[in-house]
Image (cartoon, rainbow, N blue to C red):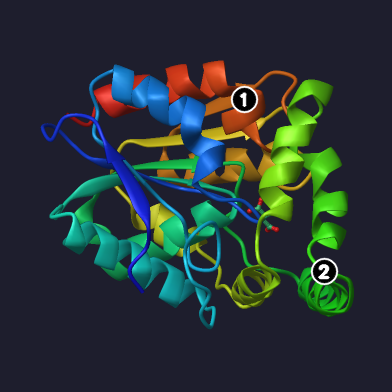
Amino acid sequence: MDLPHSDQGPHSGTPLILLHGYPLDHRMWSKVRDALVAAGHRIIVPDLRGFGKAPAGAGTMREYASDVLRLADRVGIQRFALAGFSMGGYVAMEVCRQAKGRIVGLALLDTRADADTDAAKQGRYQTIEKVKAQGIHVVAEAMLPKLVTKLDLKPEVNGWMLAQHSEGVIAALQAMATRVDSRETLATMNVPTLVIVGEKDEITPPALAEEMATLTKGKLVTVPGSAHLTPVEGAGVVGDAMVEWARQLS
Ligand code: MLT
């Protein structure tokens, strides 16, 4: 699938691709993207299949990752750095599995390396049934309190979720439920790695970030006071950490 995307910044140095989480789209990256572009980096931000302006399609993590590699080919980049937030992190780890040699840097934000437990899978299949019966607002209501704690951020983040299509959300739930464990993959990565987590992240808590930082021998940054959506709620800390990480890549 050809993903819609933005492509900003100078075409010199190492390009970076930023992958959004669920049930969101490219807009969650805008503040961090602006910081990286201002620091002189080329930043490519797609909508993953079924989100934002991207058409939905059957969902396995392999397909989401293939879309990203196809995008890299289309924009003419052989080697690039990859940052993935939450579900975007699952996609990033699958890209590492499919095309390790093309990845020159990895940033994993509020995500996890292990696969779903049976209970987590069950929860996702129940959510699929609820979305089919009642629509996307069920997911938005459950997710919003876990994404951001600051009241002034809630209306915008809620609007992003409500703008997504049920079909894309259902496909993503299926893909997340069937994803494989990525711990071995991470242990074989030998590129500058940054792991970021919100201090108050309940969806992918800090202990999971510590595990990924240990596996990758990466740098761990904890964002004080932030819930899951650190690129929005902790945009300043995340932007600074990613600019510093990106500087080592060029
Ligand atoms: C996300 O933020 O992308 C998802 O909540 C991740 C997940 O449900 O595992």
| Image height of 137 relative to 215, above or below | below
Determine the image quadrant of residue 173: bottom right
Whether residue 97 can be seen here: no
Q: What residue sits 87% from the left and 51% below the top?
A: 141
Q: Badge 1: how crowded within 10 Å, few (<14), some, or many (20+)?
A: many
Residue 60 pos. (x, y %): 52, 78
Horizontal side of residue 110 vs 200, given as left or right: left
> Which mark is first along the chain, 1 or 2?
2
Seen at 62% across and 78% down, the residue is 178
Q: Position of residue 62 (x, y in %)?
A: 43, 75
**Vertical order, 182 against 126 (above or below):** above
Q: Amino acid at mark 1?
A: Thr
**Residue under numbered circle 2:** 135
What is the number of the mark on residue 222? Answer: 1
Residue 8 x %, y %: 27, 35
Instruction: Specify whether 1 is left or right of 101.
Output: right
Report helix, strand or loop for mark 2. Answer: loop
Q: Is residue 175 left or right of residue 170?
A: left
Image point (75%, 70%), residue name:
117
- SS at mark 1? strand
User: Disc 2, ligand 1: is the CB inside 8 Å?
Assistant: no
Q: Nearer the viewer, residue 17 or 118?
A: 17
Alpha-carbon span between mark 2 and mark 1: 34 Å
